[in-house]
Amino acid sequence: MTRAQRAAEDERYRTWKGPYRPYDIIKEGTIAITAIAILVVVLAILFSSPDDRAVTTRQWARTMPVNFLQTATSELDGTSETATYGPPYNPYVSDSSTDTGAPDGLDDYTQHLWFIHLQQWFGVAHPINAAKDFVIDPLRTMPQQPALQAAINRYESASVSQQEAWAAAYTKALNKASVAGSGAVSVPAGSYGPISEMMGELLAFARAGGLDGAILNSGQLYQADYTKALMFLADGNALTAKAQQEHLLGNQWGMMNETGSYPGQVWLWLYTFWYQISPFSTSTNADIDVMAIMTVLSLGLVLIPFIPGIRDIPRRVPLYRVIWRNHYNSLS
């Protein structure tokens, strides 16, 4: 079809021969805005987002003391998810068991797509030393306990192999731990070195509410960065249990849900849909794969006016004639 033929068929080039009637756009707009405002206020009252209290290490240590100690020990010996995450939290450590020869261990980065290795490109933007930030430094803020400070000094002066042996023995003992009515955790006797005393004091510190502030302490007047506290909580089971209870896990379509039985971000269904199907539901590379798919789909949506064939569908499928059938009937 030529440009002239398309122009001749376009309604904008036709002279309107139908009837006219007055239309007060100010009145119509005022009524519409007023109705929408009332509707928004009513729905906000009925379905406003819940104000759930934040999950804290104090709550975690009081309700799940054994899991708290297991997580803290994994932070101390460098085996937790945060400690081994790599960029942007800590330097990447190559794993020879999965290295296939790619330069700089690129094949070991869990989130990558072809040549795109975002973790390596952006580097360590938010450094976290799990052992120091979550265990040692908070314990150092308790200077009035010389026995504790001596235990920390003993731990830090020991060899790496000795530290690992103490941590491994204590972690194994936690599987047989018992919890007293006071919340104290007891483990069978063993060769734990100073770790047993350090973990006991850390648990008591957390139960008293001091650990939250110690982890968040940035030396600034206002504290708005909760990354470290969230990473510590995420390494344990506290956040997972809460998320499962509120149906916020990935396999529960959590990205588009709201806490409690409230409507959430339903428009995010297309993003969270991919996490429910294979291979994304079981892939450690799912985040960047889904991001790539959504980027392609979003670009396709934006570029519809420029894609031949697709851009002509509204004109070739005359649905508009059904919608404006009264108008077209009046022309015949």
Image (tube, rainbow, N blue to C red):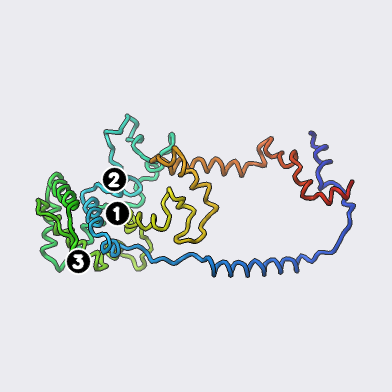
- Outermost residue toward the top in this view: 101
Q: Nearer the viewer, mark 3 or mark 2?
A: 3
Q: Residue at x 81, y 49 (%)?
A: 325
Q: Secondary structure at mark 1?
A: loop
Amino acid tagged 3: Gly
- Say if mark 1 contacts mark 2, CB within 8 Å: no
Q: Nearer the viewer, mark 3 or mark 1?
A: 3
Numbered badge on residue 84? 2
Amino acid tagged 2: Thr
Q: Secondary structure at mark 3?
A: loop
Which image quarter: residue 219? bottom left
Q: Which residue is mark 3?
A: 181
Q: Secondary structure at mark 2?
A: loop
Height in image: 310 above or below 264?
above
Q: Which residue is mark 1?
A: 236
Numbered badge on residue 119? none
User: Is 254 in front, or is 128?
Assistant: 254
**Which quarter of the rendering shows the N terminus?**
top right
